[in-house]
Image: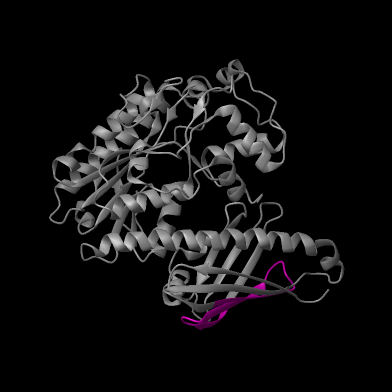
Amino acid sequence: MGHQVFERGVDLPVPREEAFAWHGREGAFERLVPPFEPVSVRARTGDGIEAGATVELVTGKPPLALSWLARHTVCEPPARFEDVQERGPFAHWHHQHIFEEAGSGRSRLTDRVEYALPAAPLGGFFAGSFVRSKLDRMFEWRHATTVFDLLAHQRAAKALSSRGQSTMRILITGASGLVGSSLSAFLTTGGHTVAPLSRSGGRGPTWDPAAGTIDRAALEGFDGVVHLAGESIAGGRWSARKKRAIRESRVQGTRLLAEALVGLDRPPSVFVGASAAGYYDERGEEVLTEESAVGNGFRAEVAAEWEDAARPVRDAGIRLVHLRFGIVLDPRGGALKEMLLPAKLGLGGPLGSGKQWWSWIALDDVLELVLAALTDTSFSGPYNAVAPEPVRQADFARALGRALSRPSFVPTPAFALRLALGELADALLLSSGRVVPARLLERGHRWRWPELEPALRAMLGSG
């Protein structure tokens, strides 16, 4: 079949200079990798998309993982940049990114890929339609993400410009986790400077929450702090030791960071702290808003103490935002990753009765919400970081089954979950939390993915 040409375009809500700049910033590649395509960066040389820069990727999963070495060959801002495959799964790959003005502050991006499959003509005969389908799904995701991200950064830039700022210098704890790593890439593509607060150091300040130590001098001068660090609540039964680690990592870590920040000569203007919809605990059919009282169980106690530990920040006049996250959905990690294998095997049916309410939010909506909280000074206090409509767990299972084209009727009895997971089963899988984002709705907040099944289909690449 020889060389094939794939071409797809998208209208962008910004001038081509800004669209081109977005693609050249740190984090752009990570933002453009679809969550349904297992791709990781092994090594980089050179500067971003400049001619001569290279990136070595690993695609697929072991034992079928493949190495891909791409080299940027052309960089002509703001008109185009190009890359070619030097080593990888294709016999030939040449990708052109073409930017054109579209008038009225808009632009158009055209991705043109010329490729050839290995072992032609048999490779093309057997794999041609499969590759074309994968390219369609991949670029549909890439273009949608580009548009949504540019719009989010446009809103943030408007909020910052109203007080004479253009970008922010942001400190992130938990930067290596699912949310933290995605947030870092998202923020840097907006032109912001991001530094992690970690135990190992490297690009940012260091701390050790368990030991009560933190590099206070290195915290000076950040405009905002996003605090995500905390022991994972998943990963097996809740032993007394595990529960203590969950509580102490959140409460002690938050208190240490808050007290360090308020003692700075140049403290941040905003502190965005992670919290959890578990703040409300098991409440059955009750609709839960930010005005609802705290619950009574372990999750609620930890969430309340977690939020209270940041009180020194608020008392010092630093704007404090608590985001009470529901189930954060992304197939690369968290709850959805754990659900995928059983669901793909047709075993992703109702858990227990399936009548319990689950409040969820897509990862990309988390990122936009954090950016809004950082840049918009009208954000303050607690916000339920969930999609507008919670769903019953059985409906969640059915939506996931449809997205995967798998049956979803095989139930898992509650007693089996309790036998396997103990207290964790009731806390995370069987409890009902009908949490709604009342304060965000009052603000007129717009979600990237307000409905569950379209969100699942998009992040799983099933259209």
The one of 360 and 158 positioned closer to us in this rendering: 158
Provide residue 298's location: percent of width, then percent of height. 37, 22
> Which residue is pictured at 24% across the width and 43% down the height?
320
Provide residue 274's location: percent of width, then percent of height. 35, 41
Q: Is residue 400 left or right of residue 440?
A: right
> Which residue is pictured at 61% across the width and 63% down the height?
139
Most common secondary structure along the magenta stretch: strand
> Which residue is pictured at 36% across the width and 36% down the height?
438
What sort of colour scheme is used for the picture?
Answer: one colour
Q: Is residue 243 left or right of residue 3?
A: left
Provide residue 432's location: percent of width, then percent of height. 47, 23
Given the current orientation, which residue lies at the most extreme top position? 415
Task: Look at the picture and state if 19 lies above or below 30.
Answer: below
Magenta stretch: includes residue 242: no
Magenta stretch: includes residue 96: yes
> Which residue is pictured at 38% across the width and 34% down the height?
276
The one of 437 and 382 positioned closer to us in this rendering: 437
Task: Look at the picture and state if 363 lies above or below 66.
Answer: above
Q: Quadrant of the N terminus?
A: bottom right
Q: Is residue 317 left or right of residue 390?
A: left
The one of 206 and 388 positioned closer to us in this rendering: 388
Q: Can you tell which quarter of the image residue 14 is in?
A: bottom left
Q: Can you tell which quarter of the image residue 133 is in?
A: bottom right
Task: Look at the picture and state if 159 lies above or below 21.
Answer: above
The one of 68 and 5 positioned closer to us in this rendering: 5
Q: Report the magenta residues as a range.
A: 72-98
Provide residue 457's location: percent of width, then percent of height. 62, 47
Residue 331 can be seen in this image: no
